[in-house]
Image (cartoon, helix red, strand yellow):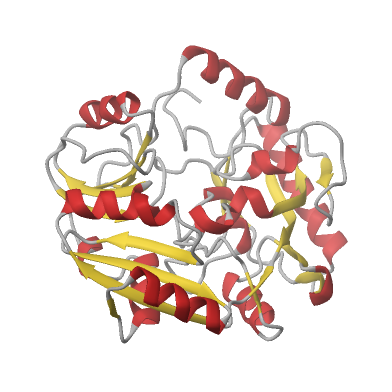
Amino acid sequence: MIQDNDQTEFIQHLIQQTLENESTIQLVGGSSKYFYGRAPQGEVLSSVEHQGIVNYHPSELVITARTGTALSNIEKTLAEHGQMLAFDPPHFSQSATLGGVVACGISGHRRPFTGSVRDFVLGCKMINGKAEVLSFGGEVMKNVAGYDVSRLMVGAMGTLGFLLEVSLKVLPKPIIELTQIFEMDTNDALTHMTALSRQSLPLSGISYDGRLLYVRLSGMEKAVIAACNRVGGDELADSEQFWLNSKEHKNHFFQTTEDLWRISVPPATPELTLSGEWFYEWGGGQRWLKTSETSQAIFKMAEQMNGYATLFRSKDRSAEMFQPMSATLKKLNKNIKNAFDPKAIFNPYRMYRDW
C-alpha cells in the first residue's frame, strides 16, 4: 500500500509535470457528481487512492480524513459512535468521496437547521497550482485569525487545487426522528413552512412536493413527541425512506429528462412565476424546478428574488450552469483563482465558460 507521503509526492510530481507541459488537469473522486457543472476537461487525476481516516476522537467531535475516502466509510465510522455529518450530504452513488462532498458543497435536508458543508469545515491540506503543499485551519473551531481560507475549497469544484485532507466538525445523532405530513396547496405550504421555521421547534427537514408538506423533527424523545403534538398533522410511517429517497434524488420528481434547476431564495419568497414542476426543500429556501424555460429567464428571476440559480442536471454540458456573477464578484473570484492556480491547470471551464 502506498504511504501518505509517497502518495502526496506522486500527486505533486504529476502536477509539476502538468505545469511543465502547459496542459490541464481534470480532478475526480468517485465520479458520483460527475454530472454536476460544465463538461470536465484535461487529463484525469483521481483522488480515490488517497484514502483513509487520519484522525478521529469521538469525544472531540472532529474527524480528519483523506479526500479519496468513501463517504459511506466515514458515515459508518461516525455512526458506530452515535455521531453524524450534520450537513447531511447526498451521495448520488456508492462511490461518493469526501473530496467530492467538499468540492461540490451540496448539503442535505438538515442544512437550514444545522448548517452547510462550509460551516463544518475546520481545516484542509491541499496542493495548489504551483505544486506546493499548503495547510489551512486545523481541528478546532477557533484556531486562526482572519479569513478561514479552508472554507474557500467548499463549492470550488476543484478549481483551486487538489485537496489532500479535510477536517470536519461532527455532531451527535438525534435520539429520535418523526415526520408529520399535511395536505395543502403551494401558497398555504409556503406560509406554513415560514411559520414553522420561526418557532422554537427541533426541526431537521421541511419539504413540499406540490401536495404534501413533510415536517421532520429530531432530538430527544420527549421534546420531539411534544413538538409533534404541537405542530399537528399525520405521522409518516416510513419517514426515513422518504428523506433518503428525496436527498438521493430517487423519488419520482427527480426521474426526468428535462433540465433540472436548483434555485436558492429567501424561504418566505412567494411562488416563482416560472413554468414547470416544483419540489420545495429547506422550508422553501431551496426549490427544484423541472422545466424547459431558458436559462436567461431563470437566472433573471433568481436575481430579482435575491437568489441564486444552478442548472443542476442538463444534457447540454456546454451551457452556463451557475448564476452569472456581477463584475466586482467575478473579479474577486478570478483573483482568488489566480492566487491558488495562476496557470489555470485545475478543472478549466468547469464552472464558467471563460475560466
Q: Please tell me in which quadrant of the rendered image residue 337 appears.
A: top right
- Residue nearer the viewer, 225 or 168: 225
Residue at 12% over, 40% down: 275
Image position of 224 with respect to 283: above or below = below
Q: Seen in the image, is 10 located left or right of residue 302?
A: right
- Residue nearer the viewer, 43 or 154: 154
Q: Seen in the image, is 306 located left or right of residue 328?
A: left
Residue at 87% over, 40% down: 144
Q: Seen in the image, is 105 located left or right of residue 250?
A: right
Q: Please tell me in which quadrant of the rendered image residue 271 appears.
A: top left
Residue 302 makes an appearance in the image: yes
Residue 33 pos. (x, y %): 45, 57
Residue 258 makes an appearance in the image: no
Q: In which quarter of the image is the N terminus?
A: bottom right
Q: How many numbered callouts?
A: 0
Image position of 288 with respect to 98: above or below = above
Residue 57 pos. (x, y %): 83, 74
Q: Seen in the image, is 32 located left or right of residue 143?
A: left
Residue 239 pos. (x, y %): 36, 80
- Residue nearer the viewer, 49 or 97: 97
- Residue nearer the viewer, 67 or 49: 67
Residue at 59% over, 44% down: 158
Residue 263 pos. (x, y %): 33, 42
Q: Please tell me in which quadrant of the rendered image residue 291 appears.
A: top left
Residue at 51% over, 70% down: 95
Residue extending farthest to the top is 327
